[in-house]
Amino acid sequence: MRGTIDGALSPLPLSPTLPAMIREDPFAQQLCAGLDEVLAPVMLSMDAFTAYLDLGTTPADMLPWLGHWLGMEVDPGEDLDLQRKLLASAGDLHAIRGTRRGIELALEAALGVDVQVLETGASSWSSDPSAPLPGEHRPAIVVIVDSTEDDPIEVERLDALVDQLKPAHVLHRVQVNEV
């Protein structure tokens, strides 16, 4: 979160609010000055609170905090544009969370590369009630990502992201193709 800012002045200094009999006391003046220094960033943050909620103006160190508000985890080490793009898509991603397309969109937003998700489920129509069911018995997905020398994909990170995005009962496997 926010810390002290050197040279920041409080818009509401405390010493003028003291009773007249202790307003000139040196200890009271120093105590108020110390509290003003600590409270100045709080006052500045509250004055600019709407800017913290806007993805275009939120400071970089506040993006993970905003992500928690939106129910999304943001990697602070990731590119700022990717972080902002991920948070901007939060509404769409929550609506289709856990689906094949939702996993693809979330991974594309997080990694900045195209992702393909293959699933074992299927559906079909038949007039024969004894017709075999399509798909496989156990639900699973395979996530396929192309990796280049310029933009390598960390398999462990990809695996952890997929584990967070998929439904808990679905097995998964990641496949990184070196291009």
Image (cartoon, grey):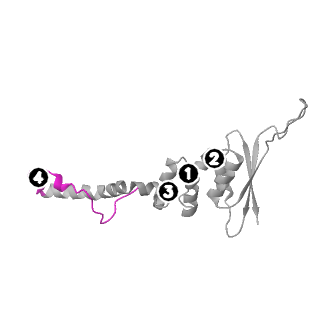
Q: Nearer the viewer, mark 4 or mark 3?
A: 3
Which residue corresponds to mark 3? 63
Q: Secondary structure at mark 4?
A: helix
Which residue corresponds to mark 2? 164
Q: Residue 94: give x, y in percent of width and height.
A: 60, 46
Task: Return the disc, 2 or 4, that comes first in the chain's sequence.
Answer: 4
Task: Return the disc, 4 or 3, that comes first in the chain's sequence.
Answer: 4
Q: Residue 55: give x, y in percent of width and height.
A: 50, 58
Which residue corresponds to mark 1? 73
Q: Residue 81: give x, y in percent of width and height.
A: 56, 63
Q: Residue at x 22, y 57 (%)?
A: 13
Q: Nearer the viewer, mark 2 or mark 3?
A: 3
Q: Are marks 2 and 1 in contact (CB under 8 Å)?
A: yes
Kind of residue sitting beneath label 3: Leu
As measured in the structure, the alpha-carbon distance from the residue carrying label 4 to the one carrying label 3 is 43 Å
Q: Which region is colored magenta? A: 1-25
